[in-house]
Amino acid sequence: MSYEKRSRGYQLFRYYIWFVDRMIHRRVVVLGRENIPQGKPIVFAPNHQNALSDPMAVLLNVSHQPVWLARADIFGKNRIIDAILRFLKIMPVYRMRDGIDSLGRNDETFKKSVQVLENNGALALFPEAMHTFKRQIREHKKAIPRIVFMALEQSGGQLDIQIVPTGIYYSHYWKFNRSLIVNFGKPITVKSYYDEYLNDPQSAMKKLRLALQDASRQLTVNIESTEYYDEFELVRELYGGTHHEGRLSESSNSTDEKLSKEFKGKTSGRMLSDMKLTGRLDKFEREHPDEAADLVKELRGFNNLLHMNKLNNLAINTKPGILCLLARILGLAAGLPVFLYGLIFNALPYFGIDLLVKSKIKDQAFWSSVSYVLTIIVFPLFYILELWAVSPWVHGWWRLFFLISLPFAGKLAYYWYSGLIITCNLVKLYITRKFKRSVWKEINRKKEELFAKLDNLILK
């Protein structure tokens, strides 16, 4: 297979996957698309946190057909799977854990990678060479520098290879209807390191690797702390909205047009705000470890208080009135028929996939990916069977309308169910405020004390 050539079959398949992807996600935001060079060889270098979902986040949001380099142990198990991987433009990379004798087989992969770049194509590989299932950018490996310098050397220094650092952010790693942000950074020109590479290859590769690593850490939320990772993630959930509102207020009073724009997006603005918040928390831990330990202790106590009273930590920043709750309940009642329609025709594949994945896949980092693949295959089969089942009662163009309506009805049913969960949490919060005043007073006091400390921390 000529990986460097565009494939019509690949492109048609990508249209279908794009539709499925948009149904899976609540919102997809692409930032920095203008940073992707045109007419030049490109290497996309995204962070890796969510197995198969990460390459989908890139390839569905660029005009290129990127050739991916993936770990070799997914190859060689089944001829059909190998054929699918080749169709999807995925090539194997062998690692030390695959056996030292297998490393020589990388020469063929690197040779084909160079061919892709020589034809102004696009490569894509994860510079961390591992997925973490955490909002952390790990140390980059040397695969990208090695490949790009090999290609540049082979062309006599003529290829203008551009490495595009890419940040991928998920509001949640495996839940349905999450938000996704793909943030393309400014490209790194490999030729600017070539002279040094000719004199000292190891030094040049290290500098390029570190430059890419630094650029990647500026493109998504990166919690560096290992000791307090979970607690800083909780701060992001509890306090992140308040911090974002403060940033919005700051940007609206600023004469800096860039600052004014960057925080206004509901999804992207929150991510940028969270990046600054978690960066400040990491800095606080490094500079004031004892105070950071005290803050974490207070945070844990507040979170335990919420759990003891069965309150959702995402609902504590709201104060719903009785009219608001009644309006939500009436809205749920009005949407009940749509929910039932979507539930009837989507419940079996949806819950079947969810149950199968959670019971059979032990590593949560793969939940999203396995669900993704099963959704692509299982839902269309169920929809065809359901069309066949109702065909005696549905005729003509109504059959097509019925078939098209099924995925949209399923997503509306999920929105209804999410609205129900939120309303139940708000009702519990309202009951606590009105009928458990001493409990609410304690919660509110601890929240104000915690948020005041966080405000002071951010302003330092």
Image (cartoon, rainbow, N blue to C red):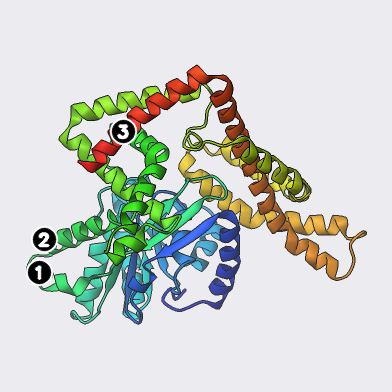
Residue 45: tell me if it is visible.
no
Percent x, y for residue 55?
44, 59
**Foreground residue, 268 or 57?**
268
Q: Callout 1: helix, strand or loop?
A: helix
- Amino acid type shown at disc 1: Glu
Which residue, given by chain and number where applicable, does mark 2 sit on? 203
Picture coordinates of residue 407 (x, y %)?
69, 57
Count of numbered tags: 3
Please give the name of the residue rendered at 27% of the width and 74% of the height, measured from the top-left corner. 161
Badge number at residue 452 = 3
Mark 3 neighbour class, 10 Å CA radius: few under 14, some 14 to 19, many 20 or more: few
Q: Do the CB atoms of the residues marked 1 and 2 lie less than 8 Å apart?
A: yes
Rendered image quadrant of residue 235: top left
Q: Would residue 44 be found to the left or right of residue 413 on screen?
A: left
In the displayed structure, 208 sits above or below 442; it is below
Residue 196, numbered label: 1
